[in-house]
Image (spheres, coloured by chain):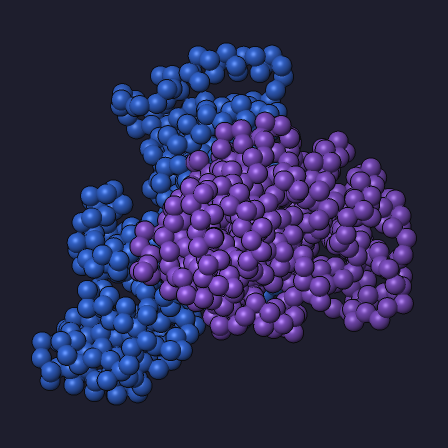
Chain colours: A purple, B blue
Amino acid sequence: MSFIERQKNRNLIQERGIEMIKIGLLGFGTVGTGVYEIINNTENNLRRLLNKEIQVSKILVRDMNKNRNVDAPKDIFTKNPLDILENPEIDIVVEVMGGIDDAYKYICLAFKNNKHVVTANKAVVSKYIDTFLQLSNKYNKGFLFEASVGGGIPIIKPLKQSARINNISNVRGILNGTTNFILTKMCDENLSFNEALDMAKKLGYAEADPTDDIEGYDVKRKLAILSSIAFNNKTDVDSIMCRGISSISKDDINMFKKLGLVSKLVGSAISNGNNYSASVEPVLLNESSTFTTVKDAFNIVSITGDVIGELQFYGQGAGKNPTANAVVSDIFDIVTDQYKRDDFVQNGNLISTGIDLFEGRYYIRVSPDNKSDMSKVLKLMDLDKLKYEILSMNENLIVITDVVRADRIEQFISKLNMLKEEYCYMRIEEDIINLKYEAK
Amino acid sequence: MSFIERQKNRNLIQERGIEMIKIGLLGFGTVGTGVYEIINNTENNLRRLLNKEIQVSKILVRDMNKNRNVDAPKDIFTKNPLDILENPEIDIVVEVMGGIDDAYKYICLAFKNNKHVVTANKAVVSKYIDTFLQLSNKYNKGFLFEASVGGGIPIIKPLKQSARINNISNVRGILNGTTNFILTKMCDENLSFNEALDMAKKLGYAEADPTDDIEGYDVKRKLAILSSIAFNNKTDVDSIMCRGISSISKDDINMFKKLGLVSKLVGSAISNGNNYSASVEPVLLNESSTFTTVKDAFNIVSITGDVIGELQFYGQGAGKNPTANAVVSDIFDIVTDQYKRDDFVQNGNLISTGIDLFEGRYYIRVSPDNKSDMSKVLKLMDLDKLKYEILSMNENLIVITDVVRADRIEQFISKLNMLKEEYCYMRIEEDIINLKYEAK
């Protein structure tokens, strides 16, 4: 439908007394454009369902003169955020501009001007989730952020619902498409980390500066949001231990295959009594686990509750359409009053214990220059009373430890750092009863 | 908390003016008991979240004198459904009694008496979903049935939400724990169908009369509900083609392993233009697909939309706690006004085409008494112009066809039936580019 046709329809609608809901978009990048398109393409459908009409009536952009391949009237764009935030006609502010400081300011101002807020911005949500939920309660307006985690996967809403009834003990997921793409290519096509990263860049799966993705910072923000909801307790982003995937070598991948294991970058948060631990790190999973079937840019989230058991949610973790779909779904929930002004209370009881609650067997590979360095490493392990089985002492020293707490491994790694050897280590996440590979 | 403590709390609550929501339970079997327990165990949590108190105030049972291992006062039970349905104090009727005729009558009466309805009853929902949604709209009351499909998996709600924005082309799932348990045991422990069924009965995964499960009738009802929502068009249960798993032999399982395939009972509905096809049948999946990682009594549902792509939802498909969790989640949605009186309109455009929209390569195994019968079968295939590759002509004739429409295979099978040979056939659901097994 062209803009003029839509406008005609709207005049008709207003004559018939159908309620008009006006939306202000903050930002018009990939997701913003997707939101605009979905709203305009599905509006007939919407009208039938809701007896309400949704209209994007203002869009905040940086550059008024940029050539945009979108069928939108010139005067819909503005450079002044107050045209949206203080516009009495606008009901819902949709923040899809990214970044932290401006986004924070605008979202607060939106609430103070009695507007509902929908956002896809994980950075600002993970940092200010408590403030935003308080404002949402204070002004009795919706605050929804489904698109901030897992792109198109509906996870925030079912997690909230599960947390109403269950004590959630565990939330974990593959939450970053770039790293999952890289690890998939390393595993399936035998590429090195750098080769796979280059391919990801070429195909648009990785940004020019991929640090946020490959070092796990992106997952850290998403995990902070998930674990804040799961445990009903704001998780400080900085309390989450975070390691990326760049130390994984071809030799590691080959050994994982022999062991029947697959490496994935997983964000995990677990709670136990008054404590919680959260980490983002590459872990090793059983070949036959559901997580290992999650390939390329797909995401998966698993939650475990005392009543419900384990639930898993799978889908496209990023991309224009899936993410915009999640934003529009939030908008619909607000329009149909199907949102809850959440009583998200920082219960204040949960204390971060770093990573002490994690434990498991560990894969450790050290690549020293010579054999005598290998024995230094083994001595270090013995000094730390780590029990282990040696899988290889050829070019690399590769061991698998007995079950051990994560903090003990970190202590060992900090000592290993002093030897300045290249290494890679990973927790084995599932019970591997029968390791395929016979240690020699 | 004991009943007397709870009662004290309630008096306190009413003094403080907290709103009291009263629930009538129709039925007090496994799920009903679970609902009662969850509501009573989480009520403090609820009060904080909702500033409302939920109370189960009446329970319809068949036998007033049955010994129940539940902490509930005698006078909460009644044999008279009108004590609930016409009780002006009751806000929400929860139907967990099962069956069709009485359940239908009671649900209609509940709406007419201005009560919200929550049900876990797939039989009555699949048959009367259109009537119930019309009544729910007419009386402006909630009608939620999350527990009717996939037990504890939140699928109905995300499916509704996706269908608001997307054209859903495909909904499919492993929706029956009994058959999935049996197939898992046949595959992983090399049991015959009957051995696995006996084990399922012993462990409580199969009922004394397992017909509904193993013949696929249970899945058919669940699929009818899913596809009605997905396509916004009531799917008649009887329009769904349905075959069970009892014809699968040990020889089949062995051949599947050689081919790198796994058999699962899958309910699938696909739409194309004005047509849809729906079937419940055992199909063959790639070993590395997510569906094949779904073991024992777990369920999975996959939906595909034009905007969102594919989403998958995994969890416990049955059992007291997961199912009761879903019922209570629906109750909370009603209590917090987070339900939508759905404008579920039979759009009337979609026409069932039987199974004509399905196509794929087919695995066919025929076990005749002698070799000459094998050639009869092959002639029959040639007559039907089926193209195939022979995998085995030893004890069994096993072939894999080229890609062919499902209705053509059904035509062939109806002719095969006249030969009165034992056989088994299955569509291969995923693109199997490299079959592991070399045909001879």
Q: Where is residue B256 drawn, in percent x and y?
A: 28, 69
Above or below, B205 against A275 in this view is below
| Residue for point 42% across, 45% down | A382
Residue at (32%, 51%) from the top-left corner? Answer: A433
Among the 4 quarters of the image, the one containing residue A340: top right
Quadrant for the N terminus of chain A, please.
bottom right
**Residue B328 location, x and y as percent?**
48, 35
Q: Residue at x 25, y 42 (%)?
A: B204
Q: At 37% across and 59% down in the image, what residue appears?
A: A391
Residue B329 visible in rendering: no
Task: Name the one closer to the observer, B406 or B60.
Answer: B406
Q: How many marks?
A: 0
Regarding residue A125, the answer to whether it shows in the image is yes
Q: Is residue B382 above or below residue A109?
A: below
Is A420 situated left or right of A72 in this image?
Answer: left
Residue B156 position within the rendered picture, expressed as x and y whole percent measured from the top left? 50, 49
Quarter of the image where the C terminus of chain A is located? bottom left
Q: Quadrant of residue B75?
A: top left
* Residue A431 placement (x, y as % from top left): 37, 49
